[in-house]
Amino acid sequence: MDKPLALKMAPKSLDEVLGQKHLIGKDKILTNLVHNKKIFSMILYGSPGIGKTSIANAIAQEMGLRYRFLNATINTKKDIDIVIEEAKMYDGIILIMDEIHRLNKDKQDVLLPQLESGLITLIGMTTSNPYHSINPAIRSRCQLFELHALEEKDIIEGLQRAIKSPYLEGIQIDDKSIKLIAKLSGNDLRFAYNLLEIAYYSTDDKVVNEEKIRRINSKPVFFSDKDGDGHYDVLSGLQKSIRGSDVDAALHYAARLVAEEDLDSLFRRLSVIAYEDIGLANPAIGPRLDAAIRACERVGLPEGRIPIGEIIVEMALSPKSNTSHVAFDLALQDIEEGNVGRVPEHIRTDAVGYKYPHDFPGAFVVQQYLPDKLKNKKYYSPKDIGYEKTFKDIYERLEKIKRNS
């Protein structure tokens, strides 16, 4: 079976790897390790299509060492045993393992002693954050290297190499079409190669142009990784953009979730933002968000983007306050530290001596509500912003009455 173009274009050496200039090049760590013929167990992590497998293969080939490729999800404990036996025969081996974050305990127990002894040198690869997803026992025996997202110029360089290669003989393609493929790839080089190859073989004249490319794929690819860090990075970007009142960035991250049709995650995070970041500065934002969510659910996509877009603009440009949840966290902290005390007698069930506020002017009367050991405790510190100005005025007026009573 003919290999895909992406595999045919795989680098044979680190010098052929695109991007990753922080790790590869003159006086950079991976290049120096290979030149010094000394390699250590490592984990390469980052989004798909940015060169993790290419770097691992290039290192193994340049080092001139025997290596084997396994996948932590597919390959079994027996497969690892076979690699270990081979390592004993040849006094060492490089094990390149994809999806390293999915390595279960049985496989880890077999592999760990061999990493410890140096019989096996592991090059693990994952799209997940290894600090969160990889067993500490494995992680502590490996150096961690984060790969950065490729830039459009890197994708274009890779495409130009493929066009000049013998694998796409006679291809005719202009610069605009190359740039379109790069844009549609979402900085995933593997995807860019695949799109170029499909466009090439779907023609009868070997001419690849923008029209043919768009017939194959018209939507850009982006890394969201719904079960991993990429997904949460988008949600984090959304929340921090709204918190920072950057309406354009907020719309961008929300649009990524809408494009993926992940409305559940979008709605949940917006609901958190409404109360965590906007809060009392604009208390109406919660009900308004609920109304926008209901409208979106009622009409569905693509029309549902209209109420969602509107509420995101309002949330980003709304005054912000986190005082209520900060105050509540301080109260919870007291509970966790045991600062509770008994409920004052006059406000217990069937209490005697309780003053009913509605019987007093302004429905307010000074009396103690907190336990004795916390009676002067202050959790809430209002901001002089948005609607919370009103609450601040009320709070300060009541505090003044308490002090004067």
Image (tube, grey):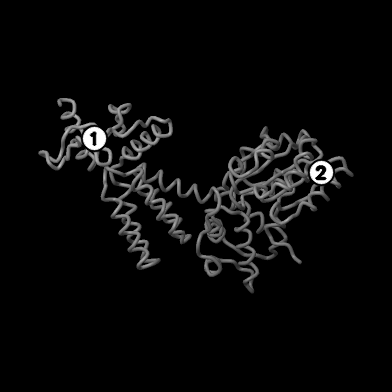
Q: Quadrant of the N terminus?
A: bottom right
Give the mark toward the camera: 1 or 2. 1
Q: Residues within 10 Å of mark 1 (few under 14, many from 20)?
A: some
Residue at position x 18%, y 26% in the image = 403
362 to the left or right of 134: left
Tell me the number on the disc at residue 93.
Answer: 2
Residue at position x 69%, y 40% in the image = 138
Residue at position x 42%, y 48% in the image = 238
x and y percentages locating residue 355 in the rendered image:
17, 37
x and y percentages locating residue 50 in the rendered image:
61, 49
Q: Quick check: 296 above or below 161?
A: below
Q: Residue furthest bottom?
A: 204
Hey, what amino acid is under mark 2?
Ile
Residue at position x 65%, y 59% in the image = 163
Query: Could you say which is closer to the camera, residue 146 or residue 141?
Result: 141
Tell me the number on the disc at residue 290.
Answer: none
Q: Residues within 10 Å of mark 2 (few under 14, many from 20)?
A: many
Q: Quick check: 246 above or below 354?
A: below
x and y percentages locating residue 123 in the rendered image:
72, 43
Circle 1 residue: 346
277 to the left or right of 395: right
Q: Quick check: 149 above or below 370?
A: below
Query: Could you say which is closer to the camera, residue 29 or residue 256?
Result: 256
Hey, what amino acid is under mark 1?
His
* Cα distance between the residues tagged 1 and 2: 76 Å
